[in-house]
Amino acid sequence: MNRLVTLIALSALALIGALATPNHAAHADEPSPRSSQALLMLYPAWARKNVCASNAYAIANPLAGKIVRYQTPVAINPHGVPQVWEAMRNFEALTSGAVTFRVVDTDPVIGIVVVTGDALNREGQPGCGHVSAQRVTPATLQLSVNRDGVIQSRLYVHLGSSHCDHVREGFQPQALSEHELAHALGLLTHFTGFTGIEGITLEMLVTLTAVYRLPPGTDVSALCARE
Ligand SMILES: [Zn+2]
């Protein structure tokens, strides 16, 4: 029950992003740079800071200062992992449709592929979850993006290993799936409320929603420098 109440509260917060989308924009996918900046300014300073650090200026982002993300709906092959389905449903509902998925049953060239059993920890040993641009370890996460800031990579979400049951480890059964999926969607570094096993939190949800309310390639460098 508490979980439900929390999610409803988070959903209401995510709606701030939805309501802030200008109604007069004829082409919702291409708001002017000014409206993008105005939108981002409606978010609290901590959210802008997270967007800057975790996406625009993350090391894995080759377009420093610009938003990089998948075009929606994001193609994903969940390979039947129920916790990933739950995570996808939660993201779609709680971001009020800013993040949407298109489930495919073959591994997409551009999109997300879920793999179980070979996750690594930071030391490269069997761990709970990681995201990589290669199917096989050793794993690095460097995004391939086009000039418009749209991610062109196939990213692998690795869940669980001989040393970690990804269903039991997190705060909820789908928490680790939510965490790794958020990495693959473009939250490239950790921040308060996005550290590993907590699943969807207010901070993660608002930051991810902001990234997906902004068009790919949005130059946020001026806003980032101001903080
Ligand atoms: Zn992580």
Image: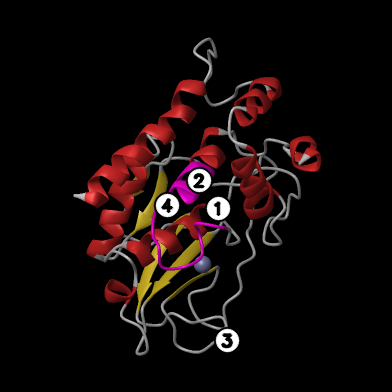
Vertical order, 143 against 2 (above or below): below
Which contiguous range is marked in magenta?
192-207
**Residue 184 left/right relative to 151:** left
User: Mark 2 is on which residue type?
Assistant: Leu
Determine the main secondary structure of the stretch shown in magenta.
loop
Q: Earlier in the sequence, mark 1 or mark 2?
A: 1
Q: Earlier in the sequence, mark 3 or mark 1?
A: 3
- Residue 201: mark in rendering: 4
User: What residue occupies the far front of the structure in this picture?
Assistant: 2
> Residue under circle 2?
208
Q: Point out the image quarter for the C terminus.
A: top right
User: Mark 1 is on which residue type?
Assistant: Gly
Q: CA distance from mark 2 to mark 3?
A: 27 Å
User: Mark 4 is on which residue type?
Assistant: Thr
**Label 1 SS:** loop
- The number of numbered badges drawn on the structure is 4
> Residue under circle 3?
123
- Residue 186: mark in rendering: 1
Q: CA distance from mark 3 to mark 1?
A: 22 Å
**Label 3 SS:** loop
Q: Quadrant of residue 112?
A: bottom left
Please rate how many residues cluster around mark 4, counting C-alpha atoms within 10 Å: few if below 14, some from 14 to 19, many from 20.
some
Residue 105 seen: no
**Label 2 SS:** helix
